[in-house]
Image (cartoon, coloured by chain):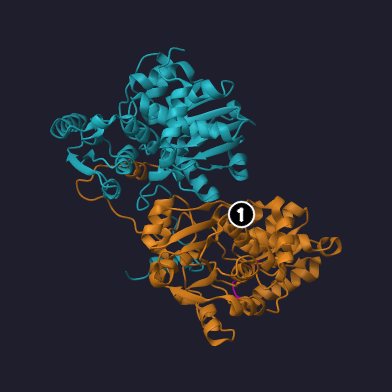
Chain colours: A orange, B cyan
Amino acid sequence: MDTPLSFQDIKDAHNRIRPFINQTPVLTSNSLNAWVGAELFLKCENLQKIGAFKIRGATNAALCLSAEEKKNGIATHSSGNHAQAIALAAQNLGVKAYVVMPDNSPTVKVNAVRGYGAEIIFCTPDISARETTLDKVIKDTGAAFIHPFNNYRIIAGQATASKELLEEVRKLDALIAPIGGGGLMSGTCLTVHYLSPSVSVFGSEPKAVDDAYRSWKSGTLQKNETTKSIADGLLTNLGDKTFAIIKDHVKDIFTVSEEEIVAAMHFVWERMKIIIEPSSAVAIAAVKQQKEVFQNMKVGVIITGGNVDLAKLPFKTVPPSPGHRQSALDFLSIQPE
Amino acid sequence: MDTPLSFQDIKDAHNRIRPFINQTPVLTSNSLNAWVGAELFLKCENLQKIGAFKIRGATNAALCLSAEEKKNGIATHSSGNHAQAIALAAQNLGVKAYVVMPDNSPTVKVNAVRGYGAEIIFCTPDISARETTLDKVIKDTGAAFIHPFNNYRIIAGQATASKELLEEVRKLDALIAPIGGGGLMSGTCLTVHYLSPSVSVFGSEPKAVDDAYRSWKSGTLQKNETTKSIADGLLTNLGDKTFAIIKDHVKDIFTVSEEEIVAAMHFVWERMKIIIEPSSAVAIAAVKQQKEVFQNMKVGVIITGGNVDLAKLPFKTVPPSPGHRQSALDFLSIQPE
């Protein structure tokens, strides 16, 4: 394979970012295994700094900049986990961060980015406004742009999640991750290629935003036609750098429905007591769906993050049944504020 | 102290139950520390088998029974975590479990107990019916009764949670746990007494069910007047065995409001991405409330469990503001079923 990243690059990235990240735990669950019909090893990046794996790539990319390149700070556009990752990476490095966010971003996300000391520049919520605004910010400030995924330093950083998993669990048959822009997926491909080439690598996507599936099938980059999925980390299209790697290394990509995503998310919350975001549930839903592929296999799953708005959960609420004793939770909900 | 449990008893309990429990992780969070003004080390028994520490005591008590004592199975009354703990402990030992539950118990809990193979005997939801029904079950079946907390084998089992914490984190200034029937709290007291006597031990309770606080203050066993707290694991009264230990060892007990409990629970879910039940949030709320006591201390916190009904969460839901872009989560909630 003609790849611009060697295993040494990934090892260097890991050593570089180690002081700034958590070595996240790998969790297992008998009840989850019974539910999906395979033995899962969850690499819990929801328990990572900023609640998502994105801090790995952002930190690596920021640390790779020269003193001259980063003296005016770093900049990006994102309303998601990459925004928080860039903000915290900049704070750790003692440089400024500029984050372009749509002006209708949820307050919880705006506050999180601001909480890490970043300067937020709002734009109208469309791609051209985002790019124009970012260009202007870079021109005005001289900050260095760090792309969320189509960047080899980002890919090398994200590759360290599967590196930790493969170093901790040495007996995996397969590894699966969700695909958004492809930074995590392409990094995962490279780690497996260099470290454990016998492990089969699978991707997973919501059916509603299946650009990676269609790109992989057709061999040419495809775009999503909507952004209508609950898996808000996976709405973006692949980049050319990430696709080139994914194309060569992924064994198959499975797509799942919105209902399958919510069911997997609910199962993990209820039984494993960890909060995973819908994008992470996509990978688990895919394993459950593809019973013939994964039956009795030992499968590593990258749990990408846990950033969800607790005020807007997709779980059905049930009214108390008639004659149902008032529970403690009922009690509080009828208290005056 | 004249205690019926030696440190050897606790070590024996630990060795006995080890094959049946998880060594749960100790998690930390910079944002939680900033929020409460102390350095917290969360012993995550929400990630324990059955989602709560109760499996420790139940397993120890079941394993201590002679072949003759357990040949007809084990029995208890509980609608909470002890019910699941007895059910799983019995399954692990290959004996029958009989669990008396109120006939209005939430389906999710009934299913969980049944899922571990226990036989459920329903009764009307009051104390006298519960005791009469349990007596009849024991008479009819010859099963051995295992009390949820007022039992030294249970206390020795629960003591192993703080034993693991103190063995992993050797620099604690204080340790705090919530108090229900007192099995966990009294076990925690004994572990600290034997292993790290310089560590201050604190209890925490909902204001609404503060029998332990009033018992500790007055020196005589008090009872709760209501069971109206969201902390559904802490509604019960202390037992004489647990109170005798708590009385001698706890430095102070702090009581918190329902609002403080929900705020602490929300913070941990949102920032740490782990699901903790309201009873666990009580201890964190107490640390936050008592800033002068805990300021800059290293505080161990026993996170008792994560069993909550996801269909009945106490978090406020916010309607989308006017002009707010439809988010992915909004999208799913308007899908037809």
Viewport quadrant of the C terminus of chain B: bottom left
Q: Secondary structure at mark 1?
A: helix
**Image coords of residue B290 (percent x, y):** 55, 29
Q: Chain of mark 1?
A: A
| Magenta residues, start to end | A122-126
Task: Determine if the magenta segment contains residue A273.
Answer: no
> In the image shown, does A267 or A203 lie closer to the viewer?
A203
Q: Residue at x 16, y 35 (%)?
A: B141
Q: In the image as oriented, which residue stretches furthest toward the front?
A: B67
Q: Is residue A141 above or below residue A117?
A: below
> In the image shown, does B142 or A323 lie closer to the viewer?
B142
Q: Is residue A142 above or below residue B250?
A: below
Task: Determine if the magenta segment contains residue A123.
Answer: yes
Q: Residue at x 31, y 32 (%)?
A: B227
Q: Is residue B288 above or below residue A250?
A: above
> In the image shown, does A241 or B32 lie closer to the viewer?
A241
Observer able to see residue A303? yes
Q: Which residue is mark 1?
A: A50
Q: Is residue A69 above or below residue A47?
A: below
> In the image shown, does A155 or A227 lie closer to the viewer?
A155
Task: Identify the main secondary structure in magenta.
Answer: loop
**Image coords of residue B204 (percent x, y):** 46, 29
**Image coords of residue A250 (percent x, y):** 56, 75
**Image coords of residue A86 (percent x, y):** 69, 60
Q: Relative to B134, is A269 on the left or the right?
A: right
Q: In the image as oriented, which residue stretches furthest toward the right?
A: A68
Amino acid at the residue labelled 1 = Ile
Observer able to see residue B179? no
Q: Residues within 10 Å of mark 1 (few under 14, many from 20)?
A: many
